[in-house]
């Protein structure tokens, strides 16, 4: 019973993030359905290495942002926000972006080391769509981080 209550609380705190994810996924699928967004199966191995590099850089920035948020917990104002659960939605955005980066990295590695995956649309979609969605959550995470940094600066 307690777990269900905690789950509902987490769900409520992350409604905007979940909504953003659902809307982003719907937009991507509608764009695919209407031919606006098509998987590019003509990409070279070099292109997949570029996807791998981009994802790695974004994930690195996200982990750095996570570190900044955690170090901000030493400030009383931020610690109060954390204990009230206010920062959960910020963590969720970072975790979502990192998960999407890892998904795209796995797909890129699969394609790089086994060329037959370059002909499987699902793997190509996974690589390219998860990169696109991770960029959306990267931008959201950086905006969230900016808000936290402003709160830290105001508390000094």
Image: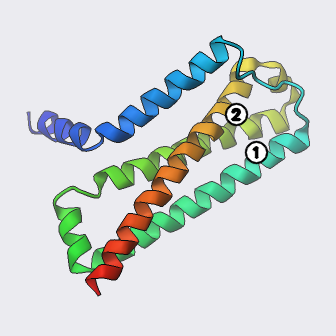
Q: Quadrant of residue 46?
A: top right
On the image, numbered disc 1 is attached to which residue? 51
Q: Check disc 1 and report its element: helix, strand or loop.
A: helix
Query: In the depicted view, which residue is nearer to us: 68 or 107?
Result: 68
- Residue 156: horizontal and vertical position, in percent? 29, 87
Question: Residue 92 has which mark?
Answer: none
The foreground one among 109 and 60 is 60
- The earlier-in-sequence mark between 2 and 1 is 1
Give how far apart the Cα atoms at labels 2 and 1 are.
Answer: 8 Å
Task: Tell me where residue 104 sits by quadrant.
Answer: top right
Binning the other alpha carbons within 10 Å of mark 1 as few (below 14), some (14 to 19) or many (20 upward) gives many
Residue 128: assigned label: 2
Q: Residue at x 84, y 24 (%)?
A: 41
Determine crowd level at label 2: few under 14, some 14-19, many 20+ residues with C-alpha closer than 10 A: many
Q: Quadrant of the N terminus?
A: top left
In this image, 87 relative to 6: left or right? right
Q: Is residue 61 positioned above or below 12 on the image?
A: below
Q: Secondary structure at mark 2?
A: helix
Q: Residue shown at 9%/39% (left/top)?
A: 2
Give the image location of residue 140, x and y in percent: 47, 51
Which residue is farthest left? Answer: 1
| Residue 82 placement (x, y as % from top left) | 23, 63
User: Which residue is rendered at x = 29% and y = 58% of the image?
Assistant: 87
Task: Tell me where residue 106 appears, x and y as whole percent.
Answer: 67, 39
Task: Work out whether residue 63 or residue 90 is closer to the camera in this orientation and state it.
Answer: 90
Do residues under tags 2 and 1 come within 8 Å of each other at their CB atoms?
yes
Residues 143 and 84: in front is 143
Q: Residue at x 45, y 69 (%)?
A: 67
In the rendered image, the vertical position of residue 114 relative to residue 46, given as above or below? above
């Amino acid at each position: 019973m307690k777990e269900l209550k905690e789950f509902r609380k987490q769900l409520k705190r992350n409604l905007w993030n979940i909504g953003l994810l659902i809307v982003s996924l719907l937009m991507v699928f509608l764009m695919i359905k209407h031919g606006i967004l098509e998987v590019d199966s003509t990409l070279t191995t070099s292109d997949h290495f570029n996807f791998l590099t981009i994802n790695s850089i974004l994930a690195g920035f996200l982990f750095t942002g996570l570190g900044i948020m955690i170090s901000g917990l030493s400030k009383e104002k931020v610690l109060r926000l954390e204990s009230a659960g206010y920062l959960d939605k910020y963590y969720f955005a970072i975790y979502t972006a990192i998960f999407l980066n890892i998904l795209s990295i796995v797909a890129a590695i699969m394609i790089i080391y086994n060329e037959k995956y370059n002909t499987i649309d699902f793997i190509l979609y996974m690589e390219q769509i998860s990169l696109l969605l991770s960029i959306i959550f990267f931008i959201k995470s950086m905006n969230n981080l900016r808000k936290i940094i402003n709160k830290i600066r105001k508390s000094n």
